[in-house]
Amino acid sequence: MPNDFLDQCRARLGEHYVLTDPADTAPFLLDWRKRFQGTALAVLRPGSAGEVADVVALCATHGVAIVPQGGNTGLCGGATPDTSGRQVVLSLQRLNRIRNVDTINDTITVEAGCILQVIQEEAASAGRLFPLSLAAEGSCTIGGNLSTNAGGTGVLRYGNARELCLGLEVVTPQGELWDGLRGLRKNNTGYDLRDLYIGAEGTLGIITAAVLKLYPAPAAQLTALAGLATPRDALALLDLARRMAGPLLTGFELMSDFCLALVGKHYPHMRYPFAERQPQTVLLELSDSESESHAREIFERLMEAAFEQGIVRDAVVAESGAQSQALWDLREHIPLAQADEGKNIKHDVSVPISRIADFIEATDAALADAFPGLRMVTFGHLGDGNLHYNVSPPEGTDYDAFLVNQASINRLVHDSVHAHDGSISAEHGLGQLKREEIVRYKSPLEIRLMQAIKQALDPQGIMNPGKVV
Amino acid sequence: MPNDFLDQCRARLGEHYVLTDPADTAPFLLDWRKRFQGTALAVLRPGSAGEVADVVALCATHGVAIVPQGGNTGLCGGATPDTSGRQVVLSLQRLNRIRNVDTINDTITVEAGCILQVIQEEAASAGRLFPLSLAAEGSCTIGGNLSTNAGGTGVLRYGNARELCLGLEVVTPQGELWDGLRGLRKNNTGYDLRDLYIGAEGTLGIITAAVLKLYPAPAAQLTALAGLATPRDALALLDLARRMAGPLLTGFELMSDFCLALVGKHYPHMRYPFAERQPQTVLLELSDSESESHAREIFERLMEAAFEQGIVRDAVVAESGAQSQALWDLREHIPLAQADEGKNIKHDVSVPISRIADFIEATDAALADAFPGLRMVTFGHLGDGNLHYNVSPPEGTDYDAFLVNQASINRLVHDSVHAHDGSISAEHGLGQLKREEIVRYKSPLEIRLMQAIKQALDPQGIMNPGKVV
């Protein structure tokens, strides 16, 4: 069977696009964080939605399970095959055309394999903004972004990948092509298939193209840093900023002092922005359709009010776009500095914004109690209730020795998230990493509902088995 | 069986909340537009989500079909039972508690039977905005708004009901209660059940409560009217307004001269805003987090640029909030004036914004050709690509005589919508009114996918049968 199947794939895609040589397939079989190593019957590289449909139909006929893969930058192993060697990886990278840009409808139609940054640049060259932005944007693909409902730094104002998508083209597990590529802001004609495929991590079908929303490019983007005492003060600043800046507020990122200390240690050229150390720092971003000076005025009024109310201890407002970028660089160097410091145990969690301070206080205390000396690398998208709540070993401890505690640390953190009405995967998805874990926190009913949908749309169970549900 | 079933319902809800007397049930059996008259075994009026779950479980046991109903203001007969007399209407009106307001998380948790306007008022009293706004807001319920994914005038900036909802509580067709009442901006842990129930018009389960997003109340809302020559000029104004006002632009409504002439005819006290008649009028709304004078400045700059570019022929900017409301009144009197003029054939359509002018030109011409003398009542949410494209009989023609053309007029309009990549139901849903019609425009694959989901979640077929799919 496998040979017959592979021959049919070769006949459809061309020899060159059915990879079986280990040297060729290796990059597709290991996830970005190097935690999941799979094997595969082959890596298939179709070049069009029609080719995707045809090879999926071949897989269905031969009962071959499919692992869709975009830029292979996922953090939960959702795009890595298992170790049976009987699955195929279906790479979408060759579907990389921008099909259409419509500046009146403010939409861009792109194929699944388009790199996120390419889409951002295409939008910018049309005087528009595509606001999805995240660390992997130089290599992740939009198909993967949609399949994991990616978040990032722009969610506060623009929403997740889901909110930025108007329509999809999807290949079903039976190899049929659904054309749902609608560029409509309003369309109430039946079940929301679009949002079902978004976030399903390739377990219900394969996204091959999407219609995405564009926004007018802002006239200016300006950032500021505020130094504060506690996460609770950061919440007070968020409330004030939302009221005074309204929809101009497009970024609100929290960084603990330890995060910025790590940046200073590993990137000594990056200047610490305040005269004295601040326990917490918030990066704010305004996107203004008028001018940089208007954004600056708003920042000045906001910081003045925050000082008066005793919320903020020190503040720096960028003088220019270039200086704004330098402030963002501080934030973006946290993941790098944390990697330079050594591995840690990562959590991608969210709680209602109103419970963030409680969550941090309670969880920090419980961890310190159970594992004295832990160093918390706490930063993230406070405006979305989303924290990267990462746990580093005590200074001088070896990470691998420390790793024996991983399961109990995860349990403690996730139980606390759950107790604060939160989510154990805010923006990274479940993949294979959290597929078992989630069963502890979702009701049996919700799991059954998900299974019923999976069974209805993929009765053969060939779409990315072992992921999500 | 029916008696046994009703006795069990009475035992659970109390005698008083199981209506069978025709005098009591009548208001629940006729839709708002008086196009659909049903009958029912009973009208059930549970008072809590637990009671909803229990009576749905009873229905499942006895094989009784359920028609969920909120404020009974739907426009497509989605909440009206059939004429068999074997269905029950399940009214959610008694589930009308505001469960929680969280001004830091900017969320409000409400039960399905809450009147939309009550939610708006509750938000306002907390200094927040709940931006869903539509004509029926004084009597429609949020459960119905979510079940039909209601649109309205705020979609341009804030999205449809779907985009305003973070979490749901739902009773399944088996009478189980799913607690998905999450107040999270980011949560990627499996299939998007929330968005599947939203817009499903009660065919997959019954929404009993929801967590909704709030926004800071704007410091000022100001409107302006612009007189223009054509819908194409309106598109140019929209583009300019989006670039110059960015996210402050919260309303962009198109009204043809005939619409405003009808308002003038039936409401002569309402002053026509321009010195000369304008073929098209656009109402713009800005919501400003700074001040009224800032909003006014933006309007003045915008109109100046629009005059310079020859887009706009005349313009009026409101001097105050009160005057803004008077301009909105003009827009809101169109449906009233149109009703005073006599019945017409209504269409709730959307197309990509970039194709609106083409759509209006092509469809107006085709209708004029096929039915000389027709009068087009064309108005709507241009910023969302959504038109209420209503067809009035030629002057002096009797509506009922004219009605023989309804099927062919619908066909012509909907075929044109489809040819322009649009939707035949932008914001009203399918209900029973458009359930057959949609089959002409959706692919057989999409219909099958919808049926598979229906079958998976409601295998007994007891949830609002005969609607949507």
Image (tube, coloured by chain):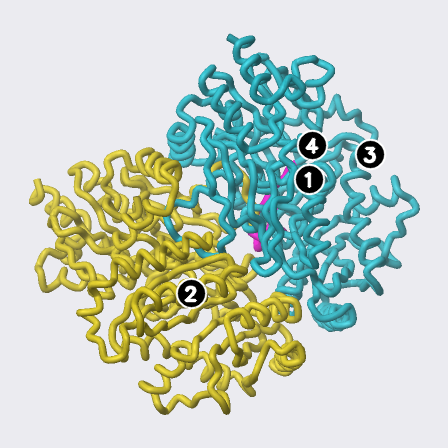
Chain colours: A yellow, B cyan
Q: Which segment is the magenta one?
A: B347-359
- Determine if residue B157 is in view: no
Q: Could you tell me how far apart the alpha carbons at marks 3 and 2 are, in whole angstroms? A: 57 Å
**Which chain is home to disc 4?**
B
- Residue B177: percent from left, percent from top: 47, 34
Question: Which is more foreground, mark 1 or mark 3?
Answer: 1
Query: Residue at point 49% right, 38% down?
Result: B197
Type of amino acid under label 4: Ile
Tell me the mark number nearer the camera, choosing from 2 and 1.
2
Whole-angstrom CA distance, mark 2 to mark 1, is 35 Å
> In the picture provided, is A143 more to the left or to the right than B34?
left
Decide which of tag 1 and tag 3 comes sooner along the chain. Answer: 1
Residue shown at 40%/81% (left/top)? A260
Q: What residue would you read off at disc 4?
A: B345
The reply to whether label 4 and label 3 mark residues of one chain is yes
Amino acid type, label 1: Ile
Q: In the rendered structure, find residue A387 and report the number of the disc placed on it.
A: 2
Q: Nearer the viewer, residue B369 or A297?
A: A297
